[in-house]
Amino acid sequence: MEFVNLQGIRLDGRRPKELRQLCAEIGVVSKADGSAAFEMGNTRVIAAVFGPRAVQNRSQKIANRALVRCEYSMAKFSTGDRVRRPKGDRRSMEISLVIRQTMEACIMTQLMPNSQIDICLQVLQADGGTRSACINAATLALADAGIPMCDIVVSCSAGYLNTTPLLDLNYIEDSGGGPDVTVGILAKMNKVTLLQMDNKLPFDTFEKVMQLAIDGCEAISKYIREVLLENTKQLEYRRGL
Amino acid sequence: MEVKSTPSQQPNLLIDQAIVPGDVVLHLSNISTNKIKLGLGLRQDADTIKATNMGLLKHSRPNKYWVESSTKRYIPTAGDAVLGIVIDSKPDNFVLDIKGPNLAFLPVLAFEGGTRKNIPKYEVGTLVYVRVVKANKIMNPEVACTDANGKSAEFGSLKDGYMFETSTGLSQMLLSSPTCPVLDALGKKLSFELAVGLNGRVWVDASSPEAVVLVSNSIMNSEFLSDTQQKIMVKTLLKKIEL
């Protein structure tokens, strides 16, 4: 299949190094302590954060840091063909684990011992890159909840199809069978907290693809930063301070 | 004092500005030898002070820095007056939910003239107005129904009335002086009782249910309104009740 045509345009009309349109909103779930909706093109996710609160299951209590729990689930209607997935299927369990580990890296868990933070992620519409979108949404929701974080985590994916590195793969490109690198970085500290790759890549190409993903992360972090700053300013503006 | 710094490193430029987690707020090397005090939302990382929460950076002379933000959760701080809900009673303590990361303990003797003989009977679900006595991250916070002098000073269980939850920012606004415009406007027309906890819980009681509903609605609406907007909102709501 031709993923990049001769003019260098991808299937959805993007250039190889172009991100999809980003859209984020903070405070979409009123009952949650912090929440955010994040869109990357046609991928839409909602993140809700509860906590820090007292640990519900006493056997899970950790004496020196907070317990972080993460629940990722896809809406039944989120994909093109309606697939019935049992709640704890392996794919969503793996993604929950990955997101939990990524978010734990930025949350200052040692400041809230004996407590618990729940991150619930719901994919409303899946078009590739749900993992990255969920991490970005979770960052926004955690910041909204006022949970202390050492930095902002952002994530972006990149792939390699038709001998071209492509940024932010959509569903068709994702299922094209090529390599797919998902990178999560701490924006200010420039540290990698998540690196996943499906399929194989030669080392020199991998470096190119990863650099592209990191560039994508930086662009997203700039956007997320703007959203957070705008949110704070809006609060103050409306209060007339 | 010689401070040589590039504009981006100058601390005063960030004061009253919005910041996000991870932002470098201060460089310790730029500051002369005196101590600085960090409040909520700031952490020291090697030679820099970094933000851990989003909000506005505030500075109070001579050396206090903190991040002001509004959240739905509450981090206990000693001295705060909060509203707690009894969720369990043990022989030595009542266990209270104060919206914090941990449950708070209210010792059964922490009342004015409290002895083993006169322990109050708080059932599960009782709303109690308490003061945070001890708050550190390792232990559960401890609260008391007395002020610092051991007097009851209005602390204790709140009967009747209506309690609702708001953000910590709104409760700080309600307690600020001069009196917040919404309370000022309401107080001119209605008589009501109000208890504001810094943990974002507000309790309202008045003689008629209409007044309770009106007061609580106007407080909940006022969070994102300017002073004049708040007064207009209260006026329109009051008109409806007079019909």
Image (tube, coloured by chain):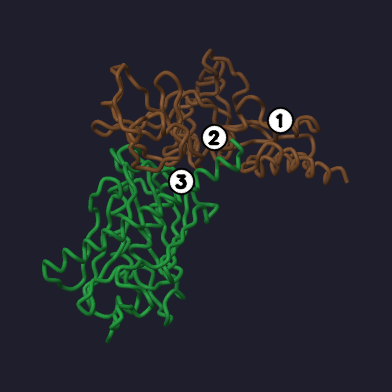
Chain colours: A green, B brown
The residue that disc 1 covers is B193
Task: Give the camera-side residue of A149 and A207.
Answer: A207
Q: Which residue is mark 3?
A: A229
Amino acid on which disc 2 is placed:
Gly
Q: Dot 2, crowdedness within 10 Å: few (<14), some or many (≥20)?
A: many
| Chain of residue at mark 2 | B
From this viewpoint, which residue is outermost toward the left? A203
Amino acid marked by disc 3? Leu
Establish whether labels 1 and 2 are both on one chain.
Answer: yes
Sort mark 1 into few (<14), some (14-19) or many (20+) by Cα contacts within 10 Å: some
Which mark lies nearer to you, 1 or 2? 1
Residue A139 x/y as whole percent: 38, 52
How far across and down, in percent of the image, does residue B162 sit?
67, 40
Viewer-proximal residue among B102 and B24: B24
At 51% from the left and 24% from the top, the residue drawn is B144
Q: Nearer the viewer, mark 2 or mark 3?
A: 3
Kindly state the secondary structure of the residue where label 2 is placed. strand
The vertical placement of A126 against B115, above or below, is below
Report whether residue B92 is seen: no
- A105 or A119, which is in the foreground? A105
Total number of numbered labels? 3
Q: Which residue is mark 2?
A: B84
Location of residue B201 in the rendering, given as x and y in whole percent from the top left corner: 58, 37
Q: A78 left or right of A29?
A: left
Chain for numbered disc 3: A
Whether residue A58 is visible, yes or no, is yes
Looking at the image, which is closer to me, B14 or B46? B14
Give the residue furthest to the right: B243
The quadrant of the picture occupied by the N terminus of chain B is: top left
